[in-house]
Image (cartoon, rainbow, N blue to C red):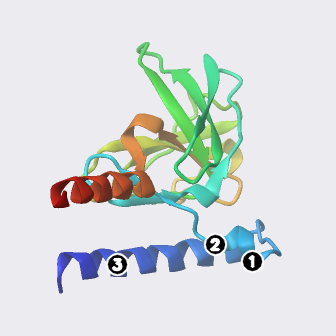
């Protein structure tokens, strides 16, 4: 199977997974326009699919140092928050309902940017790049829960993901420049 064919197959499977998650959760929407795939967020290091722009949330951390609005390639506005860990390292994050992360073991309830939520790392399942964090309410963050429930969410590091449409636009521009 060629690389492009396997990438297309991976996209189709990811869309099926996300649509299944959407319809099996309590976030079921009635209008078909809202279930259309707008854009993929991919790992900036390896290009692996991470999430869909459809899953963006406006959940604010009371511990955020600041907020800004960014416009995605789809024209959609997203709130980017700046947070700081206990080592003083700052991260710009976006919040999504669903993401594709590698399985990580235990939840941590200390030093959470979202009070009442435990967290664990979200790393790319392909290249193991640190993509962000998974958050789950403390009362449901059990040892046997590997990923957030419907009440949980993901905080992705804005600089570690990129819009697939943006990447494709750069590739198309390069192709046009080569042909001229």
Q: In which quarter of the image is the N terminus?
A: bottom left
The picture places residue 153, in percent across and down from the top left corner, at 62, 49
Residue 167 vs residue 30: left or right? Answer: left
**Label 3, on which residue?**
8
Instruction: Name, please, the residue furthest toward the top.
Output: 88
The picture places residue 20, in percent across and down from the top left corner, at 61, 78
Estimate how packed mark 1 is, as few (under 14), some (14 to 19) or many (20 or more) residues with alpha carbons within 10 Å: few
**Marks 3,2: beta carbons within 8 A:** no
Placement of 87 over or under 109, stated as above or below: above
Residue 31 vs residue 46: left or right? Answer: right
Camera-side residue: 38 or 9?
38
Residue 9 placement: quadrant? bottom left
Placement of 34 over or under 177, stated as above or below: below
Q: In the image, what residue occupies the spot 50% across and 29% down?
A: 92
Dot 1 falls on a residue whose secondary structure is helix
Estimate how packed mark 3 is, as few (under 14), some (14 to 19) or many (20 or more) residues with alpha carbons within 10 Å: few
Instruction: Name, please, the residue furthest toward the bottom.
Output: 1
**Label 1, on which residue?**
32
The picture places residue 142, in percent across and down from the top left corner, at 58, 53
Placement of 113 over or under 46, stated as above or below: above
Q: In the image, what residue occupies the spot 44% across and 57% down?
A: 165
N-terminal of the pair, mark 3 or mark 1, is: 3
Q: In which quarter of the image is the C terminus?
A: bottom left
Dot 2 falls on a residue whose secondary structure is loop
Residue 78 placement: quadrant? top right
Dot 3 falls on a residue whose secondary structure is helix
Residue 112 visible in the picture: no
**Label 2, on which residue?**
36
The CA span between labels 3 and 2 is 17 Å
């Amino acid at each position: 199977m060629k690389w492009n064919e396997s990438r297309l197959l991976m996209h189709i499977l990811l869309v099926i997974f996300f649509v299944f998650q959407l319809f099996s959760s309590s976030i079921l929407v009635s209008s078909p326009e809202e279930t259309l795939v707008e854009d993929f967020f991919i790992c900036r290091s390896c290009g692996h699919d991470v999430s869909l722009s459809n899953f963006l949330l406006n959940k604010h951390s009371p511990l955020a140092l600041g907020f800004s609005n960014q416009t995605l390639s789809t024209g959609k506005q997203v709130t980017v928050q700046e947070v700081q860990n206990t080592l003083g390292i700052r991260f710009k994050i976006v919040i999504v309902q669903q993401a594709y992360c590698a399985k990580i073991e235990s939840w941590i309830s200390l030093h959470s940017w979202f009070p009442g939520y435990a967290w664990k790392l979200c790393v790319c399942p392909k290249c193991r790049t640190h993509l962000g964090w998974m958050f789950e309410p403390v009362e449901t963050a059990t040892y046997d829960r590997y990923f957030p429930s419907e009440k949980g969410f993901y905080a992705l590091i804005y600089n570690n993901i990129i819009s697939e449409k943006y990447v494709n636009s750069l590739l198309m521009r390069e192709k046009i420049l080569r042909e001229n």
